Amino acid sequence: MDLTTVSGLTEAVQAGNRRALARVISHIENNTELAMPLLTALYPRSGKAHVIGVTGAPGTGKSTLVNALAGVYRRNDLTVGVIAIDPTSPFSGGALLGDRVRMRDLAGDPGVFIRSMATRGSLGGLAQATADVIMVLDAAGFDRIIIETVGVGQSEVEIASAAYTTVVVEAPGLGDEVQAIKAGVLEIADIFAVNKADRDGADRTVMALKMMLNLGVPEKFQVMHHGRMLPVNLPKAENLPQGWTPPVIKTVAVSGEGADTLFEAIENHRLYLEQSGGRILRDRLRAATELRMILRDYLLEDLLARTEPATLEALVEAVARRELDPYTAVRQLVSENNG
Amino acid sequence: MDRKARVLVAKPGLDGHDRGAKIIARALRDSGYEVIYTGIRQTPDMIAEAALQEDVDVVGLSILSGAHMALVPRVIEKLKELGMGDVVVLVGGIIPDEDVQALKDMGVAGVFGPGTLTPEIVETIEKALGRELA
Ligand SMILES: Nc1nc2c(ncn2[C@@H]2O[C@H](COP(=O)(O)OP(=O)(O)OP(=O)(O)O)[C@@H](O)[C@H]2O)c(=O)[nH]1
Ligand SMILES: [Mg+2]
């Protein structure tokens, strides 16, 4: 098979060729000219996988837990794609992607495919690239796709929106338990894993989480679209299914203890989403957001391509010198180019 | 660099510590590479399969055990088997002079002893990838 063409790559990916899969992911990450035609060709093949986000503070044991969890999935005859995301260094533009170190039990298993990704550019860009890579793994036929991200604020919310089930990993001993559970995390968590349960303080972390959950879980679907940059009008939050209370599960990732329970909780959540119609609604919500994001990028690029650099430069100057307000400048730019 | 080259840093063989490999991994990150670090006790199969999944441009092997003449050809062979024959292979560690040429004859693009400065490694990588240094 010809791994340099769109049709060759697409066929090979669907035939289970791992080299082709790896190449396609690179095309997407690097946004080469094959990226868009590949996405177009593979998109109709996707939509079957259940996507699981695993997020939490640095060092809580996310990679080790993914290793154990993927092991349980394999014992249940389900294939697993893993995307492990680590930050790009703002100084050098390089990245140290070290999650594979903890996933060595999965090496050599043809039912597992692990890809490390650096955050590279902007957050919005990462969310889109992640969604695209998830789609490719999905089209390649993996039953479950697990995304590991380091939870540091907005990024976990952004990436969580690509998952159907988000597992937030906490560990005891991160200081005051309640403090450690950052605002925002409660809203995205479908399941909590209190990892390193072999250590002191795990029960206190579990208690603190349960207390916070009892204070009232915010309506997550509502939060999901507030978490996005753009307003999404449909469907309305109050039309979305309620009634899932995030379970809190103790795990010891290094020994695999609790991984079975975590697996069951994830699968319960998957069934819950399917039966309540939540999965369809999430898909619609995501499609709406995705379309808007892509449209915004497309229109921006299109307009800039049709604008004389000098025209743009003049407008920038005028705004900088406060001779023109930026709103009027934009309206001028748009009307000139549509005339 | 038009895009970030991806480098797999692995430590094949049975000897257990990886300080040197980690230092190299960090230095390459600080030079702008995306470095996938896989840790110690990697078999040639594990290394080649990780290189494939990660679609790397470069594989760096850190070998202190003295087993380089056994390990390196097996990694190269596995890479070829997986259609990854184009990958640039580098070896770091304590390699006797007489083995350096033998490794290069196998297709290794660079052999680096302890204390090699990062720019030398970067230059070797960029040259092997056929890129101009900025
Ligand atoms: N005692 C104990 N240690 C654990 C457990 N799970 C993971 N660890 C250890 O915690 C450290 C960090 O584990 P990782 O799996 O790399 O954690 P991570 O959250 O993926 O880390 P980053 O990706 O760097 O944010 C390692 O030394 C693990 O061996 C556990 O259940 N108990
Ligand atoms: Mg990790």
Image: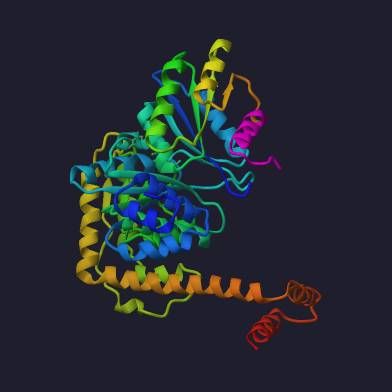
Q: Is residue A22 visible?
A: yes
What residue is shown at x 43% (from left), y 52% (from top)? A25
Q: Residue at x 44, y 28 (%)?
A: B76
Foreground pick, A133 / A34: A34
Considering depth in this image, is A22 or A238 the residue closer to the camera? Answer: A22
Our reading of the magenta stretch's main secondary structure is helix
Say which quadrant the C terminus of chain A sits in.
bottom right
**Position in image of residue A124 (x %, y %):** 51, 62
Query: Which span of residues is magenta-colored?
Result: B119-134
Residue at 41% across, 38% down: B83
Residue B45 position by quadrant = top left
Quarter location, residue A122: bottom right
Extreme residue toward the bottom, this view: A339
Q: In the image, residue B89 lies at what x, y percent? A: 51, 30
Tell me residue A261's x, y (percent): 21, 47
Above-or-below relation of A84 to A312: above
Left or right of B40? Residue A52 is left
- Name above or below for residue A33 compared with residue B36: below
Give whichever of B48, A73 is nearer the camera: B48
Asked whether residue A180 is in view, the answer is no
Residue B18 covered by magenta stretch: no
Hey, which residue is sitting farthest front in the picture? A1
